[in-house]
Amino acid sequence: MKRHVIIMVLVITCLETGAQTLPQRIDKAVKQLQQAPQMKHASMSLYVVETTSGKPVFALNEQTGLAPASTQKVFTGIAAFEKLGSAYRYNTSILYSGKIVDHVLQGDLIIKGSGDPTLGSWRFSQTTREIVLQNILVQLSNAGIATIAGNIVIDNTAFDYQPLPGGWIWDDIGNYYGAGSWAINWNENQYDLLLKPGKNEGDNVTITGTEPVLYHTNINNNLMSGKPGSGDNGYIYLPPYSNNGFVDGTVPAGEQRFKLSGALPEPALQLGEELAAMLAEKNMGQHTQTKVLYNTAADKTATQLSNLTSPTLDSINYWFLQKSINLYGEALLKTMSYQATGAGTTTAGVELVKTFWNNNGIEKAALNIVDGSGLSPQNRVTTHALVTALQFAKNKTWYNSFYNALPVYNGMHMKSGTIGGAKAYAGYHTAANGITYTFAIIINNYDTAAGSIVPAMYKVLDVLK
């Protein structure tokens, strides 16, 4: 008898579960999430639609603006596909002023940037620092230049002097993910600070060097060794254009080698000095100095040798979304502005993106942003806006490139976002029954001390499977 009762209860439970609609099952999962200890003081927004029809499936605070973190990259990436085109390439011009006399350039070597965020990047075989520098030497040789009597001039005038969006915080801007964007970017505006921690907690940490060699910069060392296995708790404080900075915090004791990745304070100067060092090594420019132009463009009568061409935009967007590279977002924002108005500024780029989305179904007030990457804690967007943007992309010729650029988390193609007390996901998923859903979920101000919020968010998204 007892066995029959148990079976009946299980059957009834299964029937009740099967009878629940998808919105009901999502609602149940959301209520369970809201009861989690991390959520006591948190705000949450969730919006789900059927991808094919656009029919709303579930909505919770979908018009409430919350900090989206890196899910904001969805807006920038899609706008770049539309405004620039998937085949768009950056061109960095190699020019010279003066004349070539007996294989000596009686003038300057000029490098004019257009905002390429991949120049010197290790992510593409044709863009590495070594390949770029070697290509410049080849172009000099092809032009019959064996020696440069003048200087290396880096023309940085395509973008404005301000490399950082407003609202980026002091703890971020000296570290690799807080790198600014210029007309000349180099090595993703990143360097590695090489360290040797002490053997025990509380020991001093030694700076053993940088990779690449960092020119004209001094970093004061305040690092200490933390507990073994404690991870990276170090921060570099070195703002743009500064010659002096410091590093603070802890790195784990007992490590033979450790590194912190910082943001180059002046990438154009770094490129120029690396090129000057290579020219000196080849006896092509023993006294060559680097001059960086920010306000007045280089000699307009200069002769062009060649262009250094970037990978196509769809490849750039792939890494932008896959690895959430903030530099790429800020460069794309300024590039869209520069191509449209001739002014490569964050402010103009933000307004262009907001106007673009306003013309495609998203009110400007639902897209309250100040940058292209989502790093600023001032950004506020709605899940309705995120889903609208994702729905806009699905019928475009470049959609497959965009979809494949989205990372896969929890078995779902979606962009993630993480920033102090904010966690978000936005993307697509095809359920077992063949129906595809477009969704966005944002939680702000959750209690990090109560544990990770991610598993609880996944339980909600699992209902779409």
Image (cartoon, helix red, strand yellow):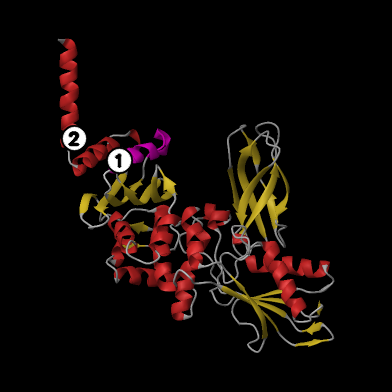
- Relative placement, left or right, of 334 versus 196 is left
- Relative placement, left or right, of 192 versus 55 is right
Q: Is residue 267 above or below residue 302?
A: above
Viewer-nearest of discs 2 and 1 = 2
Distance between the Cα atoms at labels 2 and 1?
17 Å
According to the image, label 2 marks what residue? 18
Q: Is residue 448 magenta?
A: yes
Query: Amino acid under label 1?
Result: Val
Q: Nearer the viewer, residue 177 or 15?
A: 15
According to the image, label 1 marks what residue? 460
- The structure residue drawn at horizontal position 39% and vertical position 72%, both measured from the top left corner, is 352
Residue 232, image x, y percentages: 58, 42
Which of the image's four quarters has the N terminus? top left
Graded by Cα atoms within 10 Å as few (under 14), some (14 to 19) or many (20 or more), the crowding at tag 2 reads few
Residue 364, image x, y percentages: 30, 67
Magenta span: 447-464
| Residue 298 seen in render | yes
Q: Nearer the viewer, residue 241 or 451?
A: 451
Query: Amino acid under label 2?
Result: Gly
- Relative placement, left or right, of 269 versus 433 is right
Q: Is residue 102 above or below residue 210?
A: below
- The structure residue drawn at horizontal position 28% and vertical position 38%, both measured from the top left corner, is 34
Q: Is residue 437 above or below residue 373?
A: above
Q: Quadrant of residue 72?
A: bottom left
- The structure residue drawn at horizontal position 39% and vertical position 40%, both measured from the top left corner, is 454
Q: Is residue 108 magenta?
A: no
- The structure residue drawn at horizontal position 72% and vertical position 62%, both measured from the top left corner, is 215
Residue 65, image x, y percentages: 30, 56
Q: Secondary structure at mark 1?
A: helix
Q: Secondary structure at mark 2?
A: helix
Graded by Cα atoms within 10 Å as few (under 14), some (14 to 19) or many (20 or more), the crowding at tag 1 reads many
